[in-house]
Amino acid sequence: MHIEGKAYRTIWFENNIVKIIDQTKLPHKFIIKELKTVKDSINAIKTMEVRGAPLIGATAAYGLVLSIIEKNDQSFLKKSSEDLINSRPTAINLKWAVDRMMNKLKGINSNDILNTAIKEAKAIVEEDVSFCKNIGLNGLKIIKEISKKKKDTVNILTHCNAGWLATIDWGTATSPIYHAHQKGIKVHVWVDETRPRNQGANLTSYELNEEGIPNTIIADNTGGILMQRGQVDMCIVGTDRTLANGDVCNKIGTYLKALAAKDNNVPFYVALPSSTIDWNIKDAKDIPIEERNSEELSHIDGVNKKGEVEKVLIYPKKSKAMNLAFDITPAKYVTALITEKGVCDASREGLEKLFK
């Protein structure tokens, strides 16, 4: 996708350095940051300079490359892999990418291990781009059908940022939207601001603007009344972990959107690459839900009169805050899952038909 008309990906490898778009600075500043050590990669994941399940996985894969460049030693590599996995607990792509890299590097001698690691990390990146593009093509069919019936602009509600900034390119939830826009289908996106980090307002709206797609930022609690008024034709969200039974773990607030959609007969779709499927956990209660620093709730970034980005306190000083990052949407509220291999029911049977 593009920023100021120039094509970018969210992460790339150049001269033994990993380069990322620092997403903590968007939308007010566009900064490319260099990661030179595995600790840089871990910090980028922890501080959400990179975020979104697929991008976290890619950053972890390149983190292992940086680990080998830093110190070509098996014990250091193993420790690096453990530290990367522990950097954020909820998004399954992180562990998936690290496990894939470590399995690939088993038994590789020290002379060949770096080239093997670089090749595998790049393969993970290219695979994600392909998956996200195909998610878009599969989701495009749904938007086309709504457009054909409605003969007017298709209004789509999305939550958080499951756009190209959360992946390598295209995005998951946004990929069908980008494909529809490129095909000349009129779309408009309702963008939940997505407190507390405002990834919808700061990132989704930002990237949609750069592609010329009409969008409107709304407060997180606005979606329900828009659905009641018939102003939402469909919802598309991403996911950080989807269980084999179809339960979806995504940004906090997703569950409430699904409930509102169900009550108003608005189709609720979840877009995901297969790397986000957890085939092992049976009960959603066993998914580790990340609880982040309460300061993300109590403080907010903005641009002051001098044009400087400034963090300000918005809560009473004595107030406590709880900052759970994700919630669980049961499969019964999900209309269908949009994957790189097709669209399926949110169920074990549906997923196994595509992937087993």
Image (tube, rainbow, N blue to C red):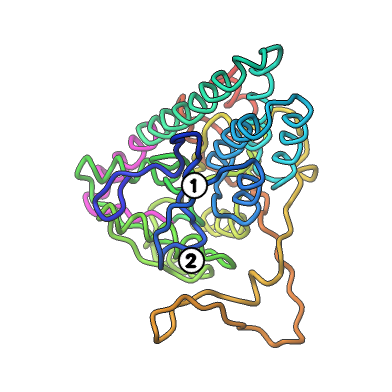
Instruction: Provide the residue span drawn in magenta.
Output: 138-157
Please state which of the two labelled residues, at mark 1 or mark 2, is closer to the viewer: 1
**Kind of residue at badge 2:** Glu
What residue appears at the point 36 percent right and 41 percent down from the top-left corner? 176
What residue appears at the point 77 percent right and 86 percent down from the top-left corner? 318
Look at mark 1 in the image and give the residue it sits on. Answer: 166
Q: Residue 56 carries which label?
A: none
Tell me the SS state at disc 1: helix
Residue 24, image x and y in percent?
52, 61
Q: Residues within 10 Å of mark 1 (few under 14, many from 20)?
A: many
Tell me the SS state at disc 2: loop
Residue 94, picture quadrant: top right
Q: Tell me, yes or no, if residue 219 can be seen here.
A: yes
Q: Does the magenta stretch include residue 72?
A: no
What residue appears at the point 38 percent right and 36 percent down from the top-left corner? 136
Q: Is residue 147 magenta?
A: yes
**Kind of residue at badge 1:** Ala
Q: In which quarter of the image is the N terminus?
A: top left
Residue 60 or 346: which is nearer the viewer?
60
Q: Characterize the magenta stretch by its predominant secondary structure.
A: helix
Lateral position of residue 101 relative to residue 130, left or right: right
Look at mark 2 in the image and give the residue it sits on. Answer: 193
Relative height, residue 202 to residue 38 (above, below): below
Q: Could you tell which of marks 1 and 2 lies nearer the N-terminus? A: 1
